[in-house]
Image (cartoon, grey):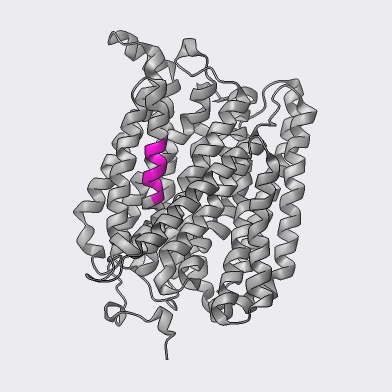
Amino acid sequence: MPDPEFSVPAEFSAPDTRGLGGHPRGLTNLFFAEMWERFSYYGMRALLILFMVAPIATGGMGMDQKSAAQIYGNYTMASYMVCILGGYIADNFIGARRAVLIGGFIITAGHYTLALNSTATFYGGLILVALGTGLLKPNISTLVGGLYSSNDERRDAGFSLFYMGINLGAFAAPLVTGWLAQSEEFRTLLIGWGLDPAHSWHWGFGAAGVGMTAGMWVYIRRIDWIKHIGNPPAPGSHKPWAKLFFVAVGTLALLGLMMLSDYEPRIAYIIYAIPVAGVIYFGIILKDEDSRRLAAILIFFIAAIVFWAVYEQAGSSLTLFADELTRNEIGSWKFPSSYFQSVNAIFIVAVAPIFAWLWIWLGHRQPSTPFKFALGLGFMGLSFALMMPASQLTAAGRVSPWWLVGVYFLQTLGEMCLSPVGLSTMTKLAPARLVGLVMGIWFLAMSLGNKLAGVIAEDFASTNPQALSNFFFQQTIVVAAATLALFLLTPWVRRLMGKHHH
């Protein structure tokens, strides 16, 4: 008899195989909608820290590196932290399908606001993009999970294909926005049109808005393919307005505390310790099935924080390394430094189908979820270990671009072992009534990891090769320790997950 919390609707009595690669056709809609949404996000992210540190004379904001890293970390943290609120609103008020629609329109408005040339519109645009992401990001993943029953072996493969869509957008975005913002060719065009070439950054931000507009068009055009999932609560059902107020206040309070940690680091230590206390409480003190699942979720939450703290430096310390210390040329071809942010996406698009096929081929023999997470952390640690000799070589001048290509390849392998698997696992472990909220908690891990990435990037030292090597070495050691701990805990975590350990 099926688990009542994960009972399968009638629509799944005969699995839908009309979509991409024999998956439900709703995956095709969500694949392309998310592809364009991520085009907008990564197109903007590719420029963000470079725009902030660029001199005012060239159209930038002229910030120092530490201030720019703080703003970058706080913005990316906020984008994912409000996913808790977005998930709760979808669960209890408007449903995941409508939350994605509203969130998408807010993101679109945010990108077009960033295209305007003023300090006020810069910060206003970031706020709008963060709020819209909070509604869209957890709920589009919830919709993907809703396309499959909990025991459908296509599930992890479906999330891997969905992840490939994300990275098609992430691949194209920096090439487009980077060319508009940084290339001499486009600035020459602007001069020929009688426009100020220093405003090229805002053309890049505007292109991200065009991408988001395309994503919303795709989503609305095929929304009937997902009409059976993501519905709001039944008409007349109780609306927990008071709880919504407390969730909103709690989210804002946590966001404010993490921003205050820029000035008082002990606040951050306390917040990062909370999930550890939760694992002890739910996994050791309480013994019921739901508590064990929550303990497993929190263990994956902690592992994800460590993973994203390293991975998300692609937009901060690795971007600065690419811009200041890497030869941005292959043969006679010179390219903007922002192009490096497409490399990870190229690898994802190449290997995602391989991972999707691998999980299906292995079936019940595939590694357990905690083992996949540990592999993901291991590859991430190796990527920063590779940055150590690259840092030493900067003493002789700019280094080959192939160092960063190697780093992004290792990070891609780690990402495929952890991120799409994590999305799938959260939708399996969460009680049906709380899937949106649990997805919000998953994105909270990304939020705290993003914040930590920004804090770490403040210590990036482009003028001191030895200090730079030590910068990457310290992070390699921390990730290696987390990897070993998760390998050792794998048997216990599998017990906590029960029948959902794959």
- Looking at the image, the residue that sits furthest to the bottom is 1
The answer to if 18 sits in the magenta stretch is: no
* Residue visible at 32% across and 60% down in the picture: 96
Q: Is residue 456 left or right of residue 144?
A: right
* Residue visible at 31% across and 68% down in the picture: 24
Q: Main secondary structure of the magenta part?
A: helix
Is residue 42 placed above or below 353 in the rendered structure? above
Start-end of magenta stretch:
127-134
Is residue 354 placed above or below 234 in the rendered structure? above
Residue 403 in view, yes or no: no
The front one of 133 and 324 is 133
Residue 342 in view, yes or no: yes
Give how far across and how far down residue 485 sits, in percent: 74, 63
Give how far across and how far down residue 83 sits, in percent: 44, 53
Quarter occupied by residue 290: bottom right
Instruction: Indicate the quadrant containing the C terminus: top left, top right, bottom left or bottom right.
Output: bottom right
Q: Is residue 500 left or right of residue 377?
A: left
Instruction: Indicate the quadrant containing the N terminus: top left, top right, bottom left or bottom right.
Output: bottom left
Is residue 35 placed above or below 357 in the rendered structure? above
Quarter occupied by residue 95: bottom left
The answer to if 133 sits in the magenta stretch is: yes
Give how far across and how far down residue 286 sits, in percent: 63, 78
Quarter occupied by residue 39: top left
Q: Is residue 417 left or right of residue 41?
A: right
Give how far across and how far down residue 278 sits, in percent: 63, 65
* Residue visible at 60% across and 70% down in the picture: 296
Q: Is residue 483 left or right of residue 466?
A: left
